[in-house]
Amino acid sequence: MIRPILKYGDTPLHQPAEPVAAITEDVQQLVDDMIETMYAAPGVGLAATQVGVALRIFVADVSVGRDPSGLIVMINPEFVERDGVQLEEEGCLSVPGFNATVMRPTRVVVKGQDRDGADRQVEGNGLLARAFQHEMDHLDGTLFVDRLRGIKRDLIVRRIKKLARSGKW
Ligand SMILES: [Zn+2]
């Protein structure tokens, strides 16, 4: 089932998520829905907070479904390693229509559990490292807009508020 994606300004999106206590059928259904929602958008990643569920789960696939081995499900993810700095344009399904250059690590190692509860550790470089950091931020209630400074941030926030006032957000 495709779930509606929350947008910047929706309260649950700005709140940190809780660890998953047990991988129940409901959690697996949520994971399946998140995968379907991510591919339908389409996007390269989706965090549970973006569909209004405050649980530490994200899905990612930088191939957007083209490579069957590209799908990554991470439940209770944690950083193992983070190195380097990259500056690239970034967007977010919860901030449609806006992009900005965001500083991210170039290499990230994340560990967690997969959909079946098996331990998994995945290394991400380049775009995948960016996606991991972006989704991990979501689980802490942080959006890429929050990572921007000064005028760049103010401009996006002002334009979103204007869209919201006119009912177009
Ligand atoms: Zn996002």
Image: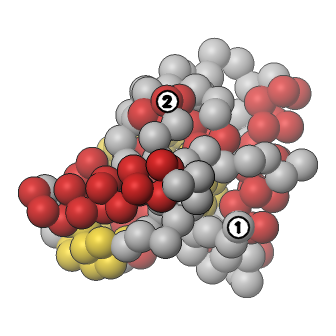
Give the crowd class for mark 1: few <14, some 14-19, many >=20 residues within 10 Å: some
Check the image and name the residue furthest to the top: 21
Mark 1 residue CB less than 8 A from any atom of ligand 1: no
Asked if the residues shown at circle 1 and circle 2 are in contact, with their CB atoms under 8 angstroms apart, the answer is no
Between marks 1 and 2, how big is the CA–CA gap?
21 Å
The amino acid type found where label 1 is placed reads Ala
Q: How many marks?
A: 2
Up the image or down, 97 lies above or below 114; here it is below
Left or right: 33 as drawn, with respect to 14: right
The residue sitting at 64% across, 34% down in the picture is 52
- Closest to the observer, 94 or 110: 94
Relative horizontal placement of residue 157, taking residue 1 as reference (left or right): left
Please tell me which residue is depicted at 58% across the width and 59% down the height of the picture: 168
Mark 2 residue element: helix
Q: Which residue of the protein is positioned furthest toward the front in this rendering?
A: 166
Q: Is residue 43 left or right of residue 84?
A: right
Res 86 seen here: yes
Where residue 21 is drawn, which disc sits there? none
The amino acid at mark 2 is Thr
Q: Residues within 10 Å of mark 2 (few under 14, many from 20)?
A: few
Q: Image quarter for residue 85?
A: bottom left
For label 1, the residue is 41
Residue under numbered circle 2: 11
